Image (spheres, grey):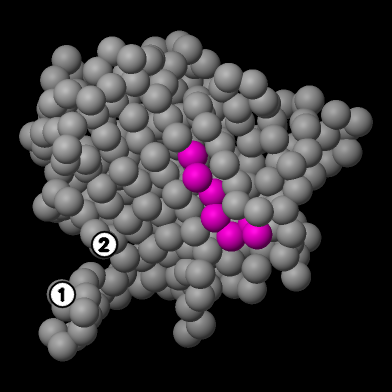
Amino acid sequence: MTWITWMPLKGKSNLHGSRTGDGRAMEFGANAPGKHRQVPLRTGSRPAGVWLVRQGALKFALPITTGTKPGVADYLPAPHGLPGFDVPVEQTVPAMVPYLELADGHVYVAGDGADEIQPASDGRSLRVVWKHWAMIGAKSGVPSDLGSSMGLTTEVSWTIAAGTLTRTEKIQAAKPVTVRRFWVMFPSTADRVSTSLVAPDSNNAGHRVDRFASSQGSLEVAVSNSTVPLNVTLQAPGDSNIGRGSRLPVRMLLQWEARNVVIQSNRPLQWSVALRPVAE
């Protein structure tokens, strides 16, 4: 069963539960009813909301909202609730949403609501645009207008097809913009990970797929169609702050990174990541 609903919420929200205007509790995670929903938290020039999905093995909540501080992982627009996926609690890390360090040394992230939110009528995709970016270390809810100052915007599309959730991003600039560092990570509570490469005779030859396995289930993660070379690292955070998840310890961090990238007006930075729950 699938569904999408756009409902106004007046109460304060969080990723693991929220309250409607009349005080009724709502669940955002994997235990939510078997449907698709989109729940708006705010409308107007800076809309916010939550995309709730329950379709087969795909069960998640993807919030687009303002957090306690810019870039905090708990409130980034990421699919919370997928098997083994969990963000470090109250930590400023790029969990499934890239951080961009620009030439001035400031770090920005697409967050704190959005400029445009366009859900598909069939509920299988969501398109979001950011012209105003959240600056790490700045005041929450006061995004920086990089769209006007340097023409820097990002368009993110989430799509569901064949049991896979795919995030596709295109970062554009009206004039050359130097990105000192671009980095994004996939944090997981999984205690096992295996990596495979697609066979040479495939159209995606050399394509890397990481499978994270845990008691919650298994999830395959694969990055593709990147217009810049991405360095990949896999690390265990151990007992550090970024190893503390909301329910279980974050045991694995898969990170992609690029440095000294120049985004041209005719050459956007593009990349995609696909997430697919799989049966063991």
**Disc 2/disc 1 C-alpha distance (Å):** 10 Å
Q: Position of residue 74 (x, y in %)?
A: 52, 37
- Within 10 Å of disc 2 (Cα), the crowding (few <14, some 14-19, many 20+) is some
Residue 206 circle label: 1
**Outermost front residue:** 266
Residue, disc 2: 224
Describe the element under mark 1 as helix, strand or loop: loop
**Height in image: 193 above or below 140?**
below
Q: Residue at x 78, y 38 (%)?
A: 7
* Disc on res. 9: none
Q: In the rendered structure, which disc, 2 or 1, sits on the residue that comes first in sequence?
A: 1
What span is in magenta? Answer: 122-128
Q: Amino acid at mark 1?
A: Gly
Q: Quadrant of residue 12?
A: top right
Does residue 193 lie above or below 121 as drawn?
below
From where the camera sits, is residue 233 visible? no
